[in-house]
Image (tube, coloured by chain):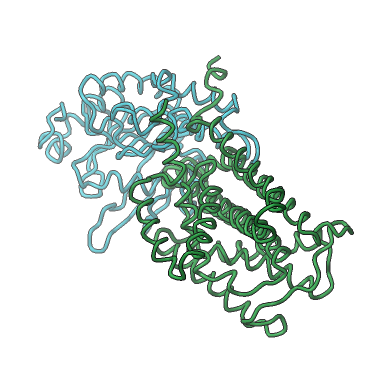
Chain colours: A cyan, B green
Amino acid sequence: MTGAVLELRGLHKAFGALVVTDGIDLDLHRGECHALIGPNGAGKTTLINQISGALQPDAGRISFEGRDVTDLSVADRAVAGLGRSFQITSILPDFTVLENVALAAQRRDGSSFRFLGRAARETRLNDAAMEALGQLGLETRADVVAGALSYGEKRLLELAIAIAGQPHVLLLDEPMAGMGRAESESLTATLLGIKKRYPILLIEHDMEAVFQLADRVSVLVAGAIVASGTPDEVRTDPQARAAYLGDDHTGDAA
Amino acid sequence: MSGASHAVAAPPARPRSALVVAGIIFAALALIPIVAEFAGGAYLTSLAVRAMILAIVAISLDLLMGHGGLVSFGHSAFVAIGAYAAGIMLTEGVYEITLILPVAMGAAALFALASGAVCMRTSGVSFIMITLAFGQMVYFALGSLAQYGADDGLTIWSAPDALGTKWLASKTGVYVTVLIALVGTWALVHRITGSRFGRVLRAARQNPVRVSSMGYSVFRYRLTAYVIAGMIAAVAGVLWATHAAFVSPSLGSWQRSGDLIVMVVLGGMATRNGALIGALFFIVIEEVLSSITHDWRLIFGPLLILIALYARGGLVGLLDRIQGDRT
């Protein structure tokens, strides 16, 4: 076994009296897509925010590729190789689609403390950006101002930005959020391709997507993991069903 | 493959016409000394020098405000630092401009680094207030320099040497130098905003959370922009001291900083010529109105409100719309 690329140990976080992360241990292995499911308010995004560095855990340790990153800033973790997408679309609305992604590529291509050369004319950055856009089928929209994209396209751009940074691990926070059925089916197919290249920690409500993509599923309820296993194991796990699957979501999320 | 066809991302609206407009403005400024021979005289050239120096400062502020989203309410402090560096050195017998400039810029850079490291930890209204506070600190500190005129200011008795020549002792020399500095600043800031660095800065204005999760330390880029803008403003301060042969703490007053913000917004933020046009327009209007009435601000205020209401994107936005209607 190659071991875990991302390890959470005893992670704990509370906002006042509200415990949002309650002693979480979680591993993400190389070549694996690990899905995190759970009802709204279970603390999924809070957990992703602690992994990406946006929130500091009260206790516990996060190690990434064998290195303790618990005290690193968001930017430093991204440089280390933790790429993320956001549940609420987070793009640069005034830039073109190409420039959104080229900026992510720029981080991997030497210093950004260059003051005179024209960044928009750097073909290496633009080519890298076009490649990432191509993976998501956005290449024909490269010259559109990102704020003018449709909702579904913005969701794809969100992913293109994450991929263009050449992360070692992708943290995807509800990539299908707000998408129609056809859109999320096509995105699932795209993610099946992307999955071969990056380990993915996936938060998703769309159960069909989760069961197609995930090698392992963990169920988060009230800040704690109540069940973890293969998709089939979790599907039949009584605790997981009671907590989540059998409740308001039955296989196919609304 | 696709690189060539996407060589230029996000071309600014009408880049060519922006260049033409700038060309016309610079040519007009270059002609003013000649016109002044026939009408206006020293008054006109002096007004133009003042306007150009303020335009340099406004352009540097636009790098922060327009492109970086950092509304600094203390930018005139950097002008004052540059002006006092020149004033003090000239008083103490250091006349060479090639020594004065680096010292002025270095002093501004140091102050920008120290104060910026604090300011950049805040945002929004807090940022405005804390830059204002640092600006006031400079204002009062300069006013307490008893050996250099304190509140009354410092008269400079000799013009700086330029590589041993008396170029800057002549009105023409000062005029040409200020014009070159203005064109240089205009070109430099445009290059910076289009560079890798500028791209990160502009992105951080739109969405700092996204930019940091891409792996950029937003703090470092903003602080660097603050230092660059401060150094440019200090150069303007040196030019001011050279032109006016007098410096006073009021150069760094918060009203001055407020005027600079008005100039940038008036002209149009984060546009190629907005800060330039805003500064020139501001000075011309101020001059015209104050020659008509002592209470010129009573007219200027409502005028600003009208522009803010009806010319979103400032004067440059207004020009673009007029042009758009015609074509």
Q: Position of residue A71 (x, y in %)?
A: 48, 54
Indicate the quadrant where residue B187 lies: top right
In the picture, measured across the screen, residue A139 lies left or right of residue B291, that is: left
Q: Is residue A150 above or below residue A76?
A: above
| Residue shown at the point (32%, 56%) measured from the top left | A13
Q: Is residue A167 above or below residue A60?
A: above
Front residue of this view, candidates A80 and A127: A127
Q: Is residue A81 above or below residue A14?
A: above
Q: Is residue B7 above or below residue B152?
A: above
Front residue of this view, candidates B301 and A91: B301
Where does the N terminus of chain A fall, quadrant-wise?
A: top left
Task: Residue lying at the far front in this picture: please name it.
Answer: B38
Task: Residue lying at the far bottom in this picture: please name it.
Answer: B146
Where does the C terminus of chain A fall, quadrant-wise?
A: top left
In the picture, measured across the screen, residue B153 lies left or right of residue B137, that is: right
Task: Residue lying at the far top in this picture: please name it.
Answer: B1
Q: Position of residue A131 (x, y in %)?
A: 49, 21
Front residue of this view, candidates B17 and B82: B17
Q: Is residue A12 visible?
A: yes
Q: Position of residue A40 (x, y in %)?
A: 19, 43
Q: Is residue B106 visible?
A: no
| Residue shown at the point (75%, 63%) measured from the top left | B103
| Residue shown at the point (72%, 48%) measured from the top left | B34
In the picture, measured across the screen, residue B218 lies left or right of residue A59, that is: right
